[in-house]
Amino acid sequence: MKFQKIYTLVLLLGLALNAFAQNPKAESGLFALTNATIETVTNGTIENGTLIIQDGLIAELGTDISIPEGAKTIDCTGLTLYPGMIDGGTRLGLSEIGSVPETNDYSDVGGINPQLKALTAVNPNSVAIPVTRTNGVTTVLTMPSGGLFPGTSALINLHGYTPKQMYADFEGIKLQFPRAGKRGRRDRRTPEEVEKEYKKSIKELDDFWTKAVDYAKIDSATGKARYIPELIALLPVVRKEAPLMVEVNAAKDIMKAIKWVEDKGINVIFTGVDEGWRVADSLAAAKIPVITGPVLTNPSRSSDRYDRPYANAGLMLKAGVKVAIRTADTENVRNLPFNAGFAAAYGMGKEEALKAVTIVPAEIFGVADKLGSLEKGKVANLFAADGDPFETKTQVKYLFIGGWKIPLVNRHTQLYDEFLERDPGVKK
């Protein structure tokens, strides 16, 4: 598989580019974050509180907390603690330099590859990872693309030397639902060609699904079905043990996807959903959770208002849809809080926008018992900021992932420091 073939190259290139990107080292141990405002997300706000980190977990939090002997105390006066933000859809770790194919590992040949796991191709040394962490993003879903079934997405924490260390307990097979319309203004196909190609794609999808269902029946009956990797990969989805992640955007396609899903009787997560606001009531009635974004983009139709992408998440939420937010990006996953900020300002509201990048994606991915809020016993993924995390002027002062105190140093801060103190400097 292409993932495997160029993984070493990507790793070496990442190391060459970022030999210093993860230095200084992260620090583990027993920490006490004191005098902080604690935004728990699920249980309100705690003023002048203390949060204890031990063994990678949140051991205690509240206003009357004893600091354990030996704890490293960090005074958070004037700072607010937030749970680490979760981006529900990125290419982080799968792509390094967009214009250099050898550094991109998010797609493979062929259209049906559900057995290809994005986790195996993640580059832990990607230069974009430290950049992303600096804005309070601690966890992302990294996803493949291309073809009908491009592969299996993986939820990863943004700290670790191997993909296994980074894995955050969720994987989801991705389906790129066939488009019934053109693919933008440069699509020169005639309406007849568009319709013909769409029908061909739907037939390919239905045929493969029929094979997957038949394979599951044989496997259940005999316990020894023939080894067919792409069909084995679909077993958890067919058996409703795992959701299928369906990428779909146009309103007409969303309606077709809802019907397809209902006919198959499977659990799904819809992703993208650019025109969800047009069919929000149908999404709510179908009880399908949605991961939408990017928010900071242009309308899908030139006739739409400029702010439709900004308002999309809020309009779906208002209709009753469970909504999380993603950037669908690589280099700019760091802008997740600003995507959420625009969604907040254009109808979603600040409280719900914060949930859309913390507890809601954790719930959608089935990891809300570990991530997404500040609660005793959860993984210590959190950050301390000196203001509203959705505002660009806010600075993240401390960040923890799995209880590790992560240095907020990255390629950008190093260049900033280098050129702030140039030697030799520029003569006036």
Image (cartoon, grey):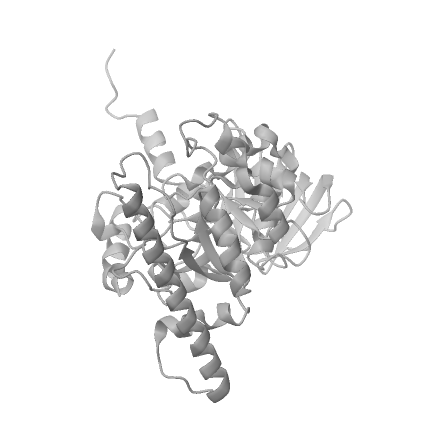
The x and y percentages for residue 350 are 63, 33
Residue 123 lies, with reference to residue 240, above or below; the image says above
The x and y percentages for residue 118 are 37, 60
Residue 133 lies, with reference to residue 367, above or below; the image says above
Left or right: 82 as drawn, with respect to 162: right
Identify which residue, 129 or 27, lies in the foreground: 129
Say if residue 282 shows up in the picture.
yes
Left or right: 110 as drawn, with respect to 310: left
Instruction: Please name the residue shown 23% across and 14% down the image.
Output: 427
Identify which residue, 150 or 75, lies in the foreground: 150
Instruction: Please name the residue shown 40% across and 28% down the image.
Output: 302
The x and y percentages for residue 243 are 52, 62
> Which image quadrant is residue 152 in?
bottom left
Say if residue 122 shows up in the picture.
no
The x and y percentages for residue 72 are 60, 49
What quarter of the picture does the C terminus occupy?
A: top left
Instruction: Please name the residue shown 50% across and 70% down the image.
Output: 238
> Which image quadrant is residue 8 in?
bottom left
> Which image quadrant is residue 81 in?
top right
Residue 417 lies, with reference to residue 327, above or below; the image says above
Q: Residue furthest top?
A: 428
Identify which residue, 401 or 123, lies in the foreground: 123
